[in-house]
Amino acid sequence: MQLPESYEALYEQARRTATTDRHAAIEQFRRLVDRLLSLPEHLLARKPDLRDLRDSAADDYLILLRWTGRNEEALAEAERFSQAIPQRADVWALERAMDLIDSGKVSEGLDTLRALLLQYPNDAYYFRGFLARELWAAGEYAEATELAKVLAQDARDDTKRVVALSLLMDIAMEADDPKAVGSYAHKIKEQTDRVPFAACEWLAGRGYWDDLEKLLKRARERFVQRVFRGEMCRAQGDEAGAKAQWAPLLDEERGGDADLYSYAAVRLLTQQADDEVTGLLQSALVEEPTDLALLLALVAALAQMGRVDEAIATVQDYLNLRRLIRPYWKRLPYSYWLRLRRYPMPDEAVEALRPHFVTEQAAAPA
């Protein structure tokens, strides 16, 4: 069914505007949603495409409000939609939870998510995963772990199981539990046949060399072996041994993600960042914008090259993205700081980056 051109055109215009000016797009979506909400129900009942457009516009409007940090407005609008479109109460409640958390009302937001998990048992897998991630960000590691374990048990395919195991590994890093990190990393390797680079980075950044050694014994990737065995040599004061591990890798013809990780890591560990390295990392991040190993390597490369403002902007862009992909952090977690600090950087760059990360181990909630 063809929608009235004015509504459809307004929707597409607002979506285009959102790519360049989110605040202007918010006003366009608000006007469109108001018009669509004023339509009588009997008309929407006869025109389901028009009803779907109303719901999509309302969704996009709330997401843009949250993305721009206009959380109080988003909360008010979510409440309005819960009255006007009650059949989508779960959607509005979920948006409300995120806005509560992002505005500092973390306990209330988490309670809203817990209620959704109970109220919608048919969507329990989705809400359980969402709650687990927000608990992880809030430092509620024990509850987050229990929920993530259920996710892993209930996963219907290998991809979902790896996602749940990766979440468990992330939580264990923040909880400073190297045994658990190693255990989940091993389970991920059983599913993917690859040792997760993130686990190796964190163990090296934390100085848990015995646990790293156990994990490396399971790694078949020769590049990964060389990166971290070189770091182990360096930690023991054997700089010659480190360079011996790393030198062959720099001569390898690169191909595949693992090669890029390792090649970039060794270039950074030996303080050889340049435009080639940053270019490779930036290109890879276009394809995988949430890849933390790539992101942290790019930040370190820019810092080594003296492009500190670009390094900070890279972190800020990622923090802004976290408003959408969840959980959202105002500062990146301590485990990320440890992974970044493996790379040598000028002192002034370290101090400039420090405000954008949690730089001390947080005490677990009582």
Image (cartoon, rainbow, N blue to C red):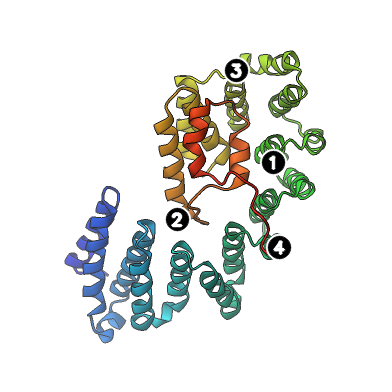
Comparing 222 with 193, the one in front is 222
**Residue 253 marker:** 3
**Residue at horizontal 56 percent and vertical 74 percent from the top:** 111
Task: Tell me if mark 3 has few (under 14), some (14-19) or many (20+) residues whose alpha carbon lies within 10 angstroms of its own.
Answer: few
**Residue at horizontal 42 percent and vertical 81 percent from the top:** 87
Distance from the alpha carbon under mark 1 to that under mark 3:
25 Å
The residue at which mark 1 appears reads as: 199
In the rendered view, does 100 fall on the left or right side of 156?
Answer: left
Task: Tell me if mark 4 has few (under 14), some (14-19) or many (20+) residues whose alpha carbon lies within 10 angstroms of its own.
Answer: some
Q: Position of residue 321 (x, y in %)?
A: 44, 49
Q: Position of residue 331 (x, y in %)?
A: 50, 49
Of the image marks 4 and 2, the number of the one nearer the N terminus:
4
Q: Are marks 2 and 3 in contact (CB under 8 Å)?
A: no
**Residue 142 marker:** 4
Task: Tell me if mark 1 has few (under 14), some (14-19) or many (20+) residues whose alpha carbon lies within 10 angstroms of its own.
Answer: many
The residue at which mark 2 appears reads as: 324
Of the image marks 1 and 4, the number of the one nearer the N terminus:
4
Distance from the alpha carbon under mark 4 to that under mark 3:
44 Å
Q: Secondary structure at mark 1?
A: helix
Q: Quadrant of the N terminus?
A: bottom left
Q: Indicate the amino acid at tag 4.
A: Ala
Q: Indicate the amino acid at tag 3.
A: Glu
Q: Position of residue 304 (x, y in %)?
A: 50, 24
In the rendered view, does 77 fall on the left or right side of 134?
Answer: left
Res 164 → quadrant: bottom right
Of the image marks 2 and 3, the number of the one nearer the N terminus:
3
Between tags 1 and 4, which lies in front? 4
Of the image marks 1 and 3, the number of the one nearer the N terminus:
1
